[in-house]
Image: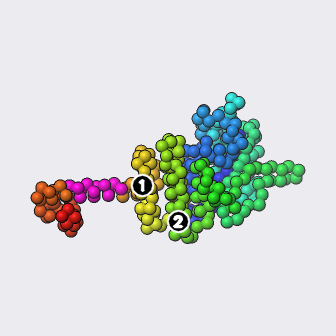
Amino acid sequence: MAIITVLEDVSDYKAIQPDQDGLWKKLIGELFEEFMLFFAPDLYEEIDFTIEPNFLQQELFKEVIIEKKGRVNADQIVKVFMKSGKERWILVHVEVQGIAEKEFSERMFKYFYKIYDKFNREIYAIALITDAEQSSKSNRFSYSELEYAYNMYEFHGKDIEQLEQSSNPFAAAVLAGIYASKTKNESHKRYLFKRKLMIEILQKFSSQREDTRTYLTSLFYFIDYLLRVPAELKKKLSEDIRPLIGKETSHTMRAEKEKLPPTIAELFADAKDEGREETKKMLAQELMREGFSDEHIAKLTKLGIEEVVKLRKSLQ
């Protein structure tokens, strides 16, 4: 059994929905196998992913949940089967926090003993520390002669180039977390990071392979909400990204349009409007060839009279 902790700094995102722990939970749930491969490769090798992981109900472990500041921290239990045939439970704990504060190691230990006491399972623990500006001090809790250690993945000091070269979608998620931490109050810098990251994702995962194309919607949703930018920069981002989305990728995203984040939804909405405008212009040109007046064409196509005049000149 493993307890997986995702920590995130949300000092300037408190009013945004969905919240960041919700974003991590969603991405982990949609790409659970890739999550385990990236953050727990040793445990990943033992899991039989031909049997779909089962996300169990929260009611099964309410007694082991620890509350902090009035909210529940632990969220999911994932039941998996090992290649040996044995059943294992992985406890996924999502918490929003920047760095590992002094009390954090103690709370990680409390999760350990409460889970062990309730389910009598071994626990494989991971903490993801997403503050890219400073390093955490310890991944251990000591009490008298007792010492408890858990695995910790810090975003601080991670090699950006190495992450960019990774084919695992969670490398992109880590990059998004790093950029979010580094650009809390710098909208334009955040826009540049976001644009760069989305372009890299399109280049990496816009293939004919279904297993990579399905990463796009999940990653774009995660990144779009995590790296929020002002409306004018969101629109500019849509304009920058549109030419890079191929036919197959566009088809994949349109098929899941209800899951699209604002930037991509706006991209397709703009494309749809442009398509309608182009149809109107084609109809206007046909009417010109049939001898209709500019005024009549403007009335029939709902184009402005100046646009109709311009089109006629282009034909001549």
Seen at 75% across and 39% down, the residue is: 122
- 46, above or below 272, in the image: above
The answer to which quarter of the image holds residue 14 is bottom right
Q: Which mark is residue 149?
A: none
Viewer-side residue, 287 vs 9: 287
For mark 2, does the 10 Å Cα neighbourhood hold few (<14), some (14 to 19), or many (20 or more) residues?
few
Q: Which residues are magenta?
A: 271-284
* Magenta stretch: helix, strand or loop mostly: helix
- 109, above or below 177, in the image: above
Q: Circle 2 — which element?
A: helix
Give the image location of residue 258, x and y in percent.
Answer: 43, 48
Q: Which mark is residue 192?
A: 2
The residue under label 1 is: 265
Between the C-alphas of marks 1 and 2, the distance is 20 Å
* Amino acid at circle 2: Leu
Seen at 14% across and 57% down, the residue is: 289
Of labels 1 and 2, earlier in sequence is: 2
* Amino acid at circle 1: Ala
Residue 267 visible to the viewer: yes
Viewer-side residue, 71 vs 230: 230
